[in-house]
Structures are given as structure tokens and as C-alpha cells.
Image (cartoon, helix red, strand yellow):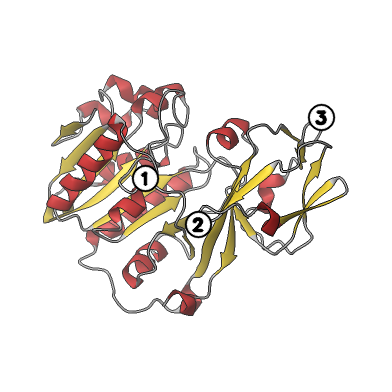
Amino acid sequence: MLTVLEAFPSDFAHVAARDLWRVLPGPTLVHLPGRRPEPLFVSVLLHGNEDTGLKAIQALLARRLAALPRALSVFVGNVAAAAAGERRLKEQPDYNRVWPGSATAGSPEHAMMAQIVTEMRQRRVFASVDIHNNTGINPSYSCVNVLDDRFLHFARLFSRTVVYFQRPLGVQSAAFATCCPAVTVECGKAGNLSSEMHAAALLEAALNLAHFPAHPLPSRDFDLYHTVGVVKVARDATFTFGSGEADLRFARTLEQMNFRDLPAGTVFAELATGNARPLDVWGEDDRQLADVYFERRGAQLRLKRAVTPSMLTVDERAIRQDCLCYFMERLEPRQAR
């Protein structure tokens, strides 16, 4: 599936995500030389409707007239889904669930991601950045899969808000964490010019780094969260926003709860009679935690304990393809030692 190039096609600089198929045959790994040979690896468009990473790369390359300070390897992922403006096509796996360490195996996409990690390891990859957008209202933030000082310094280059997570499995940042400092950056909703420039600035800063500090990041310099569960709508449950008949009725303003510390007792949804457990909460050890986090009070579903949600969205397709949100708890930096 993978095309490997030593330069971007001439038309790449200005092409929109939907038109990438005109200049790239499919998933493509591009290696560019730099003064330092150990490359920065960047993945973009693992989800076809999240184009901030593509625009950040285009902006970065437009500013670079001389040699790059460090080699740069860019993986442009789901070109077919980008053409359709979708996260992924119906017949495809999620491109950010099939990297080494995935809970699944055996597809051409799994083999492709393993090939990329092997090649980048051979090139002595310096660091890795995976660039994403959200469908809901979220601030820009960084994610790490390892509580290592180098990783936290790298994450802080992008945002003071840092999320540590172990699930879902098969994500790019976890695969690269085995060989270099690796972060995922979440850039809010697609189409925001400031987010594109923010991501480009991170890439430029990373390209200019000689090494990552190994000393602890001062706790006053960042806010650290730990993802403790992924919240999914049960397959047989219906849902709506604001009004209408369904098993679950969420507020139209649901996504405004993102990164807010919600106390126990907060109303999360209105419930219809029938479905005994319309929401599932899967913990890091794959245990079902719905009864730990939710309780039913009459026609309301309330939180049983304080949480901080992220990635809440009112996009029905995203909810069905991925999840409703993640639940997080604050983690004191000293707990990360």
C-alpha cells in the first residue's frame, strides 16, 4: 500500500486534502534531508477529515528556502478518506488503531504501519509527532503514552495541557514511544488558521532541537491529565441532542463540557425507559466501568464521581465510528515519577 518518496510532488505545496489523490497515489512516506541526519517523523491525515497536519506541513515547507536543520520524514495517511472528507471509509480500519501494539492484526494497513516503524527505527528517528483535529470543541493539547521527562518537555512545546493515555491501543504515538520521544497533538476543529500555524511552529521547534531535556518539567509549567476511560454509546442505543425521542438525550451544548472539571452528581444525559445501560465506559484494563462513573436517578443519567471529559462531540458519525468522549482525572506531576 505504501509509496516512499525522496521529495514531495511539485503540486503538493498548495493541494487541499480532498485533492491529494491527484498528486499522491495513496498512503505516502516522504523523506527529506537535513543537516542533522536523525529525522523528525510526522504523521498527518491518519483521519481523512483532519487536515490541520497537512496544512502545517505545507506552511513549514513554504517557509524553508534553505536546508532543513534536521531530516524530516512525513507520512501522509488516509488519502482515500480525505478525498471523501471522512474520518475513514466504511471498508477501512481506523488508521490510528492499526500501528504496532494494536488489539487487531492481519490487514494490509497493519503491515504498512509496521513497515513504517521499522524503517524509521533504522533511520534512528529523533522524535515523532502525530497531528490530529477534534470534531468537538476542545482546546489545543498534547498527549503522551509514556510519563518520561523527555516526552513531557516535548508535549509542553505545544501546550501546557498534557494528557497521558494508554487506551486505545494501536495508536501512532504509542508505537513510536518505543524508539523516541513521541507526542500526539490535538489541534481543535479543522479549518482554523491559528491551529495550523501553531502546529507548524511545533514542527519547526522540533526540527531545531539538538536533544530533549532529561530533567523534570516544573509542575507549575503544565497541567497533566490521565485518561481513565473511553465512553461509548451502546450499539443498540439511540441518541439525540436537545430534543427528540431516543434512549439518550444529550444537551445541544454537550461539547462545552470538554476539559471542565465536572463534580459528582452532574447530569450527563436524559434517559428514556428501556435500555438498561446505554453508555459503556471501558477502562485501561478493558474492564467495564459504567457503574463506577454513572448512576440513574429517575430519567437522568448522572456522574457518580468527579471527572474531566475530553473530545465530547455532537457529530453522530464520529460517535459511532469512534467514541462519545474520554474521561480524565487530574494527575499531579509528582505522581508521574
Residue at image x 26%, y 57%? 127
Residue at the location (29% across, 73% down)? 213
Looking at the rendered image, the quarter that the C terminus falls into is bottom left
First in sequence: mark 1 vs mark 3? 1
Task: Characterize the local packing of mark 2: few (<14), some (14-19) or many (20 or more) Cα atoms within 10 angstroms.
Answer: some
Can the viewer see residue 137 in this picture? no
The N terminus is located in which quarter? Answer: top left
Tally of numbered discs: 3
- Between label 2 and label 3, give the one nearer the viewer: 2
Secondary element at image label 3 = loop
Helix, strand or loop at label 1? It is loop
Q: Position of residue 302 (x, y in %)?
A: 78, 54
- According to the picture, the residue beneath numbered tag 2 turns out to be 284
Identify residue for label 1: 102
Q: Which mark is residue 5?
A: none
| Image vertical order of residue 38 relative to residue 314, above or below | below
**Residue visible at 23% across and 47% down?**
117
Question: Nearer the observer, disc 1 or disc 3?
Answer: 1
Residues under labels 2 and 3: Cα distance?
33 Å
Nearest the viewer among 330 and 69 is 330
Q: Could you tell whether 74 is left or right of 86 in the image?
A: left
Q: Which residue is mark 3?
A: 245
Q: Amino acid at mark 3?
A: Glu
Helix, strand or loop at disc 2? Answer: loop
Badge 3 local density, few (<14 within 10 Å), some, or many (20+)? few
Decide which of 273, 29 is in the foreground and name it: 273
The amino acid at mark 2 is: Glu
Residue occupying image coordinates x 35% and y 72%: 149
Q: Mark 1 belongs to which amino acid?
A: Ser
Whether residue 231 sits left or right of residue 23 in the image: it is: right
x, y percent for residue 44:
35, 40
